Image: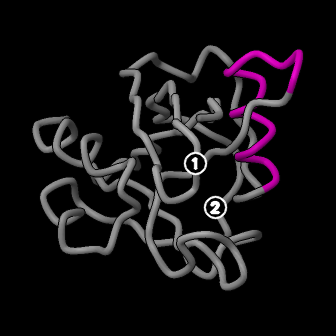
Amino acid sequence: MKILLVVAAVIINDKGEILLAQRPEGKRLAGKWEFAGGKVEEGESPESALIRELREELGIEITPKNLENFCFLSHPYQEFDFHLLMPVYICRKWQGTPKALEHSAICWVLPNDMHKLDMIEADNELVQRLQNIS
């Protein structure tokens, strides 16, 4: 099974809401919600990949000092024949207004309401971990 290294951000606004993005039509798991982020390219650090992905996906700028290590997730996707490895960072400061540049939609959700959305499987553990975040 192939190992796929991706990186994700838990972007938290001043109201304690977390930004989620809906996967677009034509992609695997279309219509499901996820945390912003993406693949780490060869030779790229997870932090650099996340900064690049957030610029591409949301049109926001983040500096490395605004990324806080949060957790590391591991999830097998048997149906797609890969195993996902995902460092996750918390981000509370950025420049610009997030926009859905590569997703169908984005939304801000309180941690206790995230379970109401149809999340991708790999993010379910992260949703649970975020229930007590402040």
Question: Which residue lies under the disc numbered 1?
Answer: 81
Residue at 25% across, 42% down: 125
Highlighted magenta segment, given as a residue range? 42-56
Residue 47 as seen in the image, left or right of residue 89: right
Question: How far from the left and from the top, in percent, is residue 116?
Answer: 19, 74
Q: Is residue 3 above or below residue 125?
A: above
Tag 1's secondary structure?
A: loop
- Image quarter hosting the N terminus: top right
Residue 71 pos. (x, y %): 36, 21
**Magenta highlight on residue 44:** yes
Give the residue type at disc 2. Answer: Pro
**Nearer to the camera, 22 or 75:** 75
Say which quadrant the C terminus sits in. Answer: top left
Above or below, 132 relative to 119:
above
* Picture quadrant of residue 130: top left
Nearest the eye: 51 or 72: 72
Res 98 quadrant in image? bottom right
- Look at the image and say whether residue 54 sits in the magenta stretch: yes
